Image (cartoon, rainbow, N blue to C red):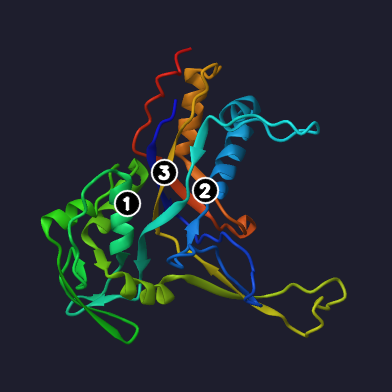
Amino acid sequence: MSDFHLGYLYSLSPIHCGGEGDLGNVLDIVREAHTDFPYIPGSSLRGSLRNDLANLDQSVANTWFGKELDSAGQMGVHQVWFGDARLLWIPMRTLSLAGQGNIFTWVSCHSLIRDHANLVNLDCPEFSNQAVGIRAGNYSVADAQINVLAMSDEQKAICSLVSNFPQQLQSTVETNWSNNRIVLCDSDFYTLMEHSLWTQIRNKIQDGDGINPEGAAEVFWTDICIPRDTIFYFPWGYNILTNSSLTKEDHTILISILQGLIQVGGQANVGRGWVKSWINNSASPITVVN
């Protein structure tokens, strides 16, 4: 049978999924073709979850995700699937609210809120081109000014998550997030993304003779990452086989991974890619009866 669920990710460190591409010394991240917004590919999420599960029990990992390709060209069939993790709320540390000094707020846009609503089968109220937020006022970012109107009750409802924050984030994140959110039109959000992505300039390590392979005295490159404190959502679900050998214990192990800490993307050696994961429904699929 097929099943459909929703999960969320909260980034605890910058996330880098992607590669250098054609940008020279700028190490860019993977982006959606139609929006240019960064995201976490479902394959990256799936691979991380499989590795974590395999570290606990290789047999259970093979049962859920399918046996990996062997020398005979044979591989197993997956019984759980994961879609791309898309942006939902991204932090904007440079924003300030007139009369209240610098503040920490999260920003989203019409299309991200709408797509999340569609995924959870909720009607999305209309958003005008005027920015709306939990706290109305004049905000500034860099040299730009944004006039933010108060959200309606319907807009507040659709901007909420369909699953409570995990206990570890409720006292430290949820209250702040609940009181500091702004929804922009898509064009303004696209512009502000230039100020919200995390960047760092690094120099390439020299070889044993103190020479860079490129021949230059010093070689620098710029990392681009999705910043910490970003909230993502992702679809996932079951595709249980009719002759499945899954047990309730197998399901419990999978859920424990899905509600824990996960490392996604590259540069794990410098602590990047750590996210807290949680899901909206941890019930077993009805065919898990053993």
- For label 3, the residue is 235
Q: Outermost residue, bottom direction? A: 143
To which quarter of the image does residue 212 belong? bottom right
Q: Position of residue 115 (x, y in %)?
A: 33, 54
Marks 1 and 2, how far apart in space?
A: 16 Å
Kindly indicate whether the residue at mark 1 contacts the one at mark 3 (C-beta within 8 angstroms): no
Q: Position of residue 90 (x, y in %)?
A: 37, 63
Marks 3 and 1, how far apart in space?
A: 10 Å
Q: Outermost residue, top direction? A: 290
In this picture, residue 194 sits left or right of residue 97? right
Task: Report the amino acid beneath label 1.
Answer: His
SS assignment at label 1: helix
Label 1 packing within 10 angstroms: few (<14), some (14-19), many (20+): many
Label 2 packing within 10 angstroms: few (<14), some (14-19), many (20+): some
Can see residue 201? yes
Q: Earlier in the sequence, mark 3 or mark 2?
A: 2
Above or below, comparing residue 97 to residue 51 in the picture: below
From the viewer's side, name the closer residue of 115 and 171. 115
Kindly indicate whether the residue at mark 2 contacts the one at mark 1 (C-beta within 8 angstroms): no
Identify the residue shown where x is 33% and y is 46%: 119
Identify the residue shown where x is 34% and y is 38%: 280
SS assignment at label 2: helix
Q: Position of residue 78 (x, y in %)?
A: 57, 32
Label 3 packing within 10 angstroms: few (<14), some (14-19), many (20+): many
Can see residue 171? no
Q: Earlier in the sequence, mark 1 or mark 2?
A: 2
Task: Report the amino acid beneath label 3.
Answer: Pro
To which quarter of the image does residue 266 belong? bottom right
From the viewer's side, name the closer residue of 85 and 12. 85
- For label 1, the residue is 116
- For label 2, the residue is 42
From the viewer's side, name the closer residue of 115 and 183. 115
